[in-house]
Each structure stands twice: as C-alpha cells, then as structure tokens.
C-alpha cells in the first residue's frame, strides 16, 4: 500500500507548466494580494476519485482538502481559511498555529535560539519563549514560493521552490528548497522535500496541516483513534525542548502502538502531558526492516463515525504529534465555525526537535556536497463500518 517507489522517478518524469495553461485536473485562481502587492495564487487539484486539494503559493499552505466519508459524503478535513487576509491577520499571527504550511528551515524547536556548528555559534530569533520555533520570526510558512503545476503518470501536483538567502533568520548557507505535492489516484498526498546548501546548516522540513476527520470546524479530535508506530519518544522540559532522553513508551500515555482514542489518557496526571498541555511530543518511529529508504508507516488515525482513515508514512525518523492544545476558539475557519480547543491534530514528520544541540539525536546538518531528501505520504481511505477495524 504505502511506499510509492514513483517518488524516486518523479523528478525525471513529470511535465511542468509554467504558462497560464494548466495541466488537466488543476485550476489556478487568485487568493488575494500580500500587503506589498504580490499576488497570491490558489491551485485547486483534483484526482479521479473526487478528492480535492487547494494550495496557495504563500507558505505552500494547503488551505483545504476534501475527502469522502464512508457514505461518499465529501468534507474538508483540514483547518484553514479561504482568504489571504485571515492568514495575515494579527489574531492569526499572535496565535501562530501554522495551519497547513510548509515549515523551514528548521521544523520544531531549537533551544535558546542558538547552536554551534564547526566551532561557530549561530543566533536565531526566538519566537517561542526562550526558543526558536519553526524557523524563526519569518519562516518558510510566510514566504511566497515559486510554483510549477505538473501532471505525471503518478498524479497531479505542484513543485514549490524557495531559495533562502545565506544568513536568513540567522541560519548559515544559501538554501535552495524544492518541495513537491502529488495527489495520486490512489488517494495519497505524496510530499517530497529536497534542499541544497552552500554552507553546512541544519535543515528539518515538514508540513503542518491540522486534521479533523469529522470535517474542519467540528468538535475536538479527542474521539479520533490514533496508532503511532513508535516504541519510544523524546521527553521534554517545560519549554518543550527534549531532555535528550529516548524514553520507552510502555506503560505511559505515549504508548499508541495499539489504536487508542486521543482523549483516553489526556486527563492523566503526567508531567509530560502537563508541560505540553496535552500531546506535543516527538515520537521515535519504528522502521520496518527491509524497506530501505522507502517511507514506512508512521501513524494511522481513524475517526469512527465518518469512517475516515488517515495514514502517514515517512522516511523521517520522527513524528511530532500535536493535539491542538493552543487552539482556543479565537480563530474562525472557512466554515464560519470557531476552531475550538483541540479541534485539530497535526502529525509532523521530521527529525527530532533541537537536534543541532543534541549530540545523541540523528544529525540534521546538511553539507554542501549533499542533497537533503525526505518523503512523506498521507493516505486517505475509509473503514467499512463503525465497528470494523481498518483492514490493511
Ligand atoms: C508545533 C509545536 C506546537 C505548536 C504548533 C503551532 O506543533 O510543537 O507546540 O507551536 O506547532 O501552534
């Protein structure tokens, strides 16, 4: 099922369109303008089964994603807005939820906005208490990306590129980033990330969609059943920085190896849950032997009533599961309904937080002679009935 070998071939086989002519299954419209006058484009991409995704070039944000429930009813399952003004508003920026956006240069936190590389100490803007979150004050989520739509044998999608100048947000090296979103007729959204740098630099790219499989603007996701393919996680301190420990999940609320309702253990007295106000932790993914460099299953979410199932596979070693703890109803989404506490969940595939300061974590340093490459696949399906578990 998951493990699209096509991702390797994709770069060679896709045909892109840069003029106003769009490949079949892709439409472009205006999403408004940035304050400096630059136009924000919205791309609507559909597959043969009617799944529809809309993406804007600002932040590479997935603004909507419509998938069928078990009866065929389509609902939009990601949180977001339908005008650029909402993504630029003060309320949004203060809440800083990163709805649907591409995250870079460094997804997740870097402690005290500082790291040392090859004997030099680099300082980054701190935008999350004492720490740097998701690339600093102006991360990739707030950049205007260059977009090339394409249609290939594997599906339809977009290639997004952005070149981050040397020193941007304090990071060394000029970083050329290329991300592709492919919507396949197997109901997968395949994301391929590549980057090159001119100087050694930390890189950790991810996607920050919030899902609610009942449809965005619904009640909390505490009733969603979650499986995470991880027997360890990285515990955090009170500022959400890993302590460096790789802890066994056994006997803790972090054991999601068997599908468990997200809310089932949320109320337990647990220091880790208290620090994060819920789940906001990096899981150390178990890798399937023999899969080589292909994405392996990281998580599965089932929403019992609608029957919607979301599976996540990745080549990354970690997964940040965030249960929407900071959502408080102050933002109103596309449907006109407020995004209340825990009404969306994020599953961010990534390297571990604060890796540049954690010698025992897998390295996130990209050197000029290497290409950063990672792949993540989100797969959408349904269960046949409320009591029937998802069949692999
Ligand atoms: C990540 C972080 C969370 C939160 C969200 C955005 O998931 O880990 O703590 O900041 O982004 O609100």
Image (cartoon, rainbow, N blue to C red):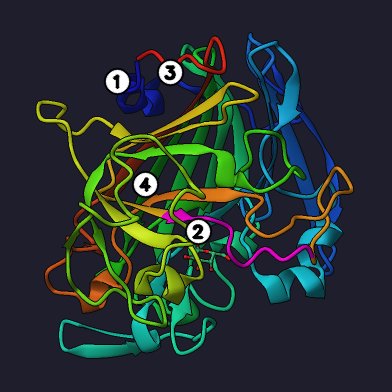
The alpha-carbon separation of the residues under discs 1 and 4 comes to: 16 Å
Q: Position of residue 328 (x, y in %)?
A: 72, 66
> Of circles 2 and 3, which is in front?
3
Look at the numbered disc 2 and give the secondary structure of its residue: strand
Residue beneath label 4, please? 194
Give, as a single range, the part of the protein colored magenta. 321-329
Above or below: residue 209 compared with residue 341: above
The residue carrying pointer 3 sits among few (fewer than 14), some (14 to 19) or many (20 or more) residues within 10 Å by Cα, namely few
Q: Say if the magenta span includes residue 34.
A: no
User: In the rendered image, which quarter contains the C terminus?
Assistant: top left
The alpha-carbon separation of the residues under discs 3 and 1 comes to: 27 Å
Q: Earlier in the sequence, mark 2 or mark 1?
A: 1
Q: Earlier in the sequence, mark 1 or mark 4?
A: 1
Q: Position of residue 80 (x, y in %)?
A: 73, 49
Q: Earlier in the sequence, mark 4 or mark 2?
A: 2
Q: Earlier in the sequence, mark 2 or mark 3?
A: 2
* Residue 389: mark in rendering: 3
| Mark 1 CB lies closer than 8 A to ligand 1 | no
Look at the numbered disc 1 and give the secondary structure of its residue: loop
In terms of image quadrants, where is residue 130?
A: bottom left
Q: Position of residue 324 (x, y in %)?
A: 58, 58
- State the residue in front, 57 or 222: 222
Residue beneath label 2, please? 103
- State the residue in front, 235 or 3: 235
Residue beneath label 1, please? 5
Q: Main secondary structure of the magenta part?
A: loop
Q: Earlier in the sequence, mark 4 or mark 3?
A: 4
Q: Is residue 220 left or right of residue 206?
A: right
Q: Position of residue 355 (x, y in %)?
A: 25, 70
């Amino acid at each position: 099922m998951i493990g699209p070998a096509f991702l390797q071939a994709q770069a060679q086989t896709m045909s892109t369109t840069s003029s106003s002519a769009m490949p079949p299954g892709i439409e472009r419209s205006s999403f408004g303008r940035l304050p400096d006058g630059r136009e924000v484009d919205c791309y609507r991409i559909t597959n043969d089964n009617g799944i529809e995704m809309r993406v804007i070039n600002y932040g590479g944000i997935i603004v909507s994603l419509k998938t069928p429930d078990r009866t065929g009813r389509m609902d939009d399952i990601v949180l977001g807005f339908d005008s650029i003004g909402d993504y630029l508003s003060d309320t949004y920026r203060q809440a800083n939820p990163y709805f649907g956006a591409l995250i870079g240069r460094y997804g997740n936190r870097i402690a005290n906005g500082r790291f040392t590389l090859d004997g030099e100490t680099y300082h980054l803007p701190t935008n999350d208490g004492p720490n740097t979150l998701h690339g600093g004050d102006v991360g990739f989520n707030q950049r205007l990306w260059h977009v090339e739509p394409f249609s290939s044998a594997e599906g339809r999608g977009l290639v997004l590129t952005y070149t981050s100048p040397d020193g941007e947000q304090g990071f060394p090296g000029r970083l050329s980033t290329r991300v592709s979103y492919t919507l396949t007729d197997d109901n997968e959204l395949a994301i391929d990330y590549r980057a090159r740098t001119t100087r050694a630099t930390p890189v950790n790219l991810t996607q920050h969609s919030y899902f609610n499989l009942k449809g965005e603007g619904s009640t909390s996701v505490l009733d969603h059943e979650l499986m995470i393919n991880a027997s360890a996680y990285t515990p955090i301190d009170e500022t959400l920085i890993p302590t460096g420990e790789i802890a066994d999940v056994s006997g803790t609320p972090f054991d999601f190896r068997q599908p468990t309702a997200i809310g089932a253990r949320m109320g337990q007295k647990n220091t880790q849950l208290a620090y994060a106000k819920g789940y906001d932790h990096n899981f150390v993914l178990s890798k399937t032997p023999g899969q080589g460099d292909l994405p392996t299953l990281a998580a599965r979410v089932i929403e019992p009533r609608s029957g919607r199932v979301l599976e996540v596979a990745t080549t990354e070693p970690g997964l940040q599961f965030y249960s929407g703890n900071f959502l408080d109803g102050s933002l109103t989404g596309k449907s006109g309904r407020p995004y209340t506490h825990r009404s969306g969940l994020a599953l961010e595939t990534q390297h571990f937080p604060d890796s540049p300061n954690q010698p025992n974590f897998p390295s996130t340093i990209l050197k000029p002679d290497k290409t950063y490459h990672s792949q993540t696949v989100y797969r959408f399906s349904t269960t046949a009935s409320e009591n029937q578990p998802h069949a692999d």
